[in-house]
Image (cartoon, rainbow, N blue to C red):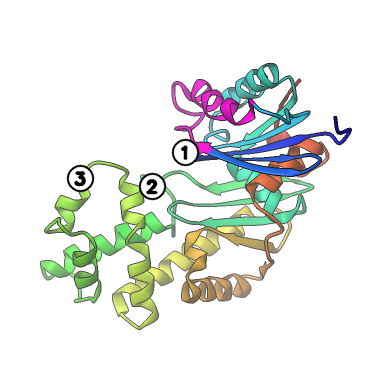
C-alpha cells in the first residue's frame, strides 16, 4: 500500500455531489446531491449522497466536505462530520460549500469571494474574521443574482404590457423564452424551482443591456450596484475579490462589474481553485481564518 495519506474532498450541492480522491494518484467521482443540511432530513440525506462515493478504494485518511446549507445549520454540519468520521474511519471536516469555495478560490488567503449565479453572496475572510453578506435566498435576498435579474425582467415586461412602463426588447425575448406559456404570470405559477426558472432569463437581460436596451441596461446597472455593495460589505480589511458564478461568464456583464469594483477600490484576482480544492485545504490545515466555521470530528 502507498504511504501517501489519502485526502478525499467532497463538494455536496443540492443537485450534484462531486468527489476528488487525492492520494498517490487523483481520482474524480460524481453522484447525486442532497437537498441541503438545513432541511429536516438534511444529515441523513447528505450521508446517503456521500458514502457511496467513498465506499471503494482508496479509503480516506482525511475527509473534507463542503455542504450546501451548513452555514445556516451548524449543528447539522457537526452531526454530519461525526457521522462521516464514524462511517469512513477518517478525520473529517465539514464546512459550508460557500466556505470551501472561498478557501479554494483564494488558496486560503484573505480576500472576498463574490458569487453571482442563480443566487448571490459575498464571503470575506482575513485574519480578523469572516463575514457572509447575502446568500439569503430569492425571497429576501440574492441581490443582483440571475434570479433577481429574471424577476426584474418579468416585472418590466408586465409593466410594459399594460402601459405602466416603457417598451422594451425584453418583451419579445421573454415571450419566446417562456413558451408554451402565454404570459409571464402563468409561467411564474408553474411548478418547480422559480429561482432557477427566473435565472434562465438572466442572459436575455444581459444581452439586451449590452446592445443598449434602456430598460435592460437599468436592470443590469442595478445588479452591478447591488453586487458591488455586497462585495464591499463583506470586506474585512482586504481589497482582493475573486468573481465566481455563471453571471460572471457573460463578457459584457463581467466588464461592467469589474469596472464597478475597481471604482470601489477593489482588485479582481484570478481564482486559485474551486470548492474541492478548498475542502482539501481545510481538511489539511487548521490555521486558516475559516476555522471558526469548520466542524471537525475523528
Quarter of the picture holding the N terminus: top right
Instruction: Kindly identify which numbered label has been placed on residue 14.
Output: 1
Residue 106 included in the magenta stretch of the image? no
Q: Are marks 2 and 1 in contact (CB under 8 Å)?
A: no
| Secondary element at image label 2 | loop
In the figure, 228 relative to 286: above or below? below
In the figure, 86 relative to 214: above or below? above
**Nearer to us in this view, 91 or 38:** 91
Callout 3: 10 Å neighbours few (<14), some, many (20+)? Answer: few
Mark 3 — residue? 190
Q: Which residues are magenta?
A: 31-55
**How many numbered marks does the figure carry?**
3
The percent position of residue 257, horizontal first and vertical second, equals: 53, 70
Quarter of the picture holding the C terminus: top right
- Which residue occupies 31% across, 52% down? 197
Instruction: Kindly identify which numbered label has been placed on residue 203.
Output: none
- Which residue occupies 36% across, 61% down? 149
Callout 1: 10 Å neighbours few (<14), some, many (20+)? Answer: some
- Which residue occupies 79% across, 47% down? 127
Callout 2: 10 Å neighbours few (<14), some, many (20+)? Answer: many
State the separation of the CA atoms marked 2 and 3: 17 Å
- Which residue occupies 59% across, 25% down? 51
Q: Nearer the viewer, mark 2 or mark 1?
A: 1
Mark 2 — residue? 138
In the figure, 7 relative to 227: above or below? above
The percent position of residue 286, horizontal first and vertical second, equals: 81, 36
State the separation of the CA atoms marked 1 and 3: 21 Å
Residue extending farthest bottom: 212
| Secondary element at image label 1 | loop
Q: Earlier in the sequence, mark 1 or mark 3?
A: 1
Amino acid at each position: 500500500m502507498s504511504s501517501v495519506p489519502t485526502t478525499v474532498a467532497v463538494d455536496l450541492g443540492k443537485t450534484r455531489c462531486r468527489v476528488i480522491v487525492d492520494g498517490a494518484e487523483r481520482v474524480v467521482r460524481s453522484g447525486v446531491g442532497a437537498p441541503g443540511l438545513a432541511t429536516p432530513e438534511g444529515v441523513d440525506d447528505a450521508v446517503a449522497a456521500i458514502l457511496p462515493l467513498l465506499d471503494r478504494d482508496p479509503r480516506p485518511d482525511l475527509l473534507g466536505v463542503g455542504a450546501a446549507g451548513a452555514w445556516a445549520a451548524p449543528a447539522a454540519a457537526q452531526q454530519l462530520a461525526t457521522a462521516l468520521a464514524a462511517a469512513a474511519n477518517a478525520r473529517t471536516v465539514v464546512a459550508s460549500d460557500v466556505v470551501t469555495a472561498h478557501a479554494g478560490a483564494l488558496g486560503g488567503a484573505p480576500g472576498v469571494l463574490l458569487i453571482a449565479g442563480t443566487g448571490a453572496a459575498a464571503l470575506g475572510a482575513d485574519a480578523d474574521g469572516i463575514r457572509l453578506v447575502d446568500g439569503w435566498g430569492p425571497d429576501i435576498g440574492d441581490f443582483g443574482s440571475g434570479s433577481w435579474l429574471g424577476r426584474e425582467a418579468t416585472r418590466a415586461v408586465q409593466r410594459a404590457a399594460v402601459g405602466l412602463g416603457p417598451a422594451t426588447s425584453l418583451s419579445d425575448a421573454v415571450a419566446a423564452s417562456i413558451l408554451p406559456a402565454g404570459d409571464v404570470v402563468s409561467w411564474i405559477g408553474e411548478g418547480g424551482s422559480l429561482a432557477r426558472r427566473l435565472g434562465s432569463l438572466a442572459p436575455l437581460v444581459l444581452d439586451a443591456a449590452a446592445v443598449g436596451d434602456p430598460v435592460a441596461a437599468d436592470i443590469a446597472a442595478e445588479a452591478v450596484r447591488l453586487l458591488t455593495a455586497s462585495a464591499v460589505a463583506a470586506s474585512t480589511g482586504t481589497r482582493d475579490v475573486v468573481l465566481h458564478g455563471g453571471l460572471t461568464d457573460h463578457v459584457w456583464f463581467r466588464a461592467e462589474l469589474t469596472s464597478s469594483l475597481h471604482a470601489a477600490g477593489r482588485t479582481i484576482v484570478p481564482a486559485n481553485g474551486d470548492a474541492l480544492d478548498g475542502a482539501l485545504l481545510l481538511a489539511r490545515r487548521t490555521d486558516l481564518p475559516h476555522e471558526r466555521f469548520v466542524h471537525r470530528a475523528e
